Amino acid sequence: MADPTAELIDRLLASGKVSSDTRDELRSYKDDLAKGQLEGGDRRYVEALASRLLGASVDSGEETAEGEDEGSLDDEDLWDVGEDAEIAELRARAEAAEARVQELEAEVAQLKQQLGQA
């Protein structure tokens, strides 16, 4: 069975919706995954990013192959896998940063529109 996180990474890389820094980070995650060293927090980050940018999740749109282990990652809610205080703080900071980016993108779009009307 292909790892669903690897599939999400591939979809994100193919989407063209991520910055070059994020592309590098995703490639690093894929290398870690191949070595069996990808941490749970990184898996959750990939899932959240795919959800936000692609409307995808670990189990969305993916049919379970016959004979696949019922306890596989597809069946787990990754957000319920325990997380420590540092990860929670980083998640909160990332969410705040993403919200600010959206605000700034809206401001830029508005300024572009105003400049086009001038």
Image (cartoon, grey):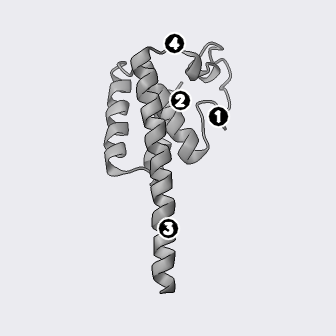
Residue under label 2: 4
Whether tag 2 and tag 1 are in contact, CB under 8 A, the answer is yes
> Tag on residue 23?
none
- Left or right position of 33 against 5: left
Which one is closest to the eye, mark 4 or mark 2?
A: 4
Q: Position of residue 84 (x, y in %)?
A: 44, 14
Crowd class of label 2 (few under 14; some 14 to 19; many from 20; radius 10 Å): some
Label 4 vs 1, first from the N-terminus:
1
Q: CA distance from mark 2 to mark 3?
A: 35 Å
Q: Look at the numbered disc 2 and give the secondary structure of its residue.
A: helix
Crowd class of label 1 (few under 14; some 14 to 19; many from 20; radius 10 Å): few
Residue under label 1: 62
Q: CA distance from mark 4 to mark 3?
A: 39 Å
Which one is closest to the eye, mark 2 or mark 3?
A: 3
Whether tag 4 and tag 3 are in contact, CB under 8 A, the answer is no
Label 2 vs 1, first from the N-terminus:
2
Q: Look at the numbered disc 3 and give the secondary structure of its residue.
A: helix
Q: CA distance from mark 4 to mark 2?
A: 19 Å
Residue under the image location 54 percent in, 15 percent down: 81
Q: CA distance from mark 4 to mark 1?
A: 25 Å
Residue under the image location 51 percent in, 12 percent down: 82
Residue under the image location 43 percent in, 16 percent down: 85
Q: Position of residue 3 (x, y in %)?
A: 50, 27
Q: Look at the numbered disc 1 and give the secondary structure of its residue.
A: loop
Whether residue 74 is visible to the viewer of this picture, yes or no, is: yes
Q: Position of residue 4 (x, y in %)?
A: 53, 29
Crowd class of label 3 (few under 14; some 14 to 19; many from 20; radius 10 Å): few
Label 1 vs 3, first from the N-terminus:
1
Q: CA distance from mark 2 to mark 1?
A: 9 Å
- Left or right position of 106 against 87: right
Q: Nearer the viewer, residue 48 or 32?
A: 48
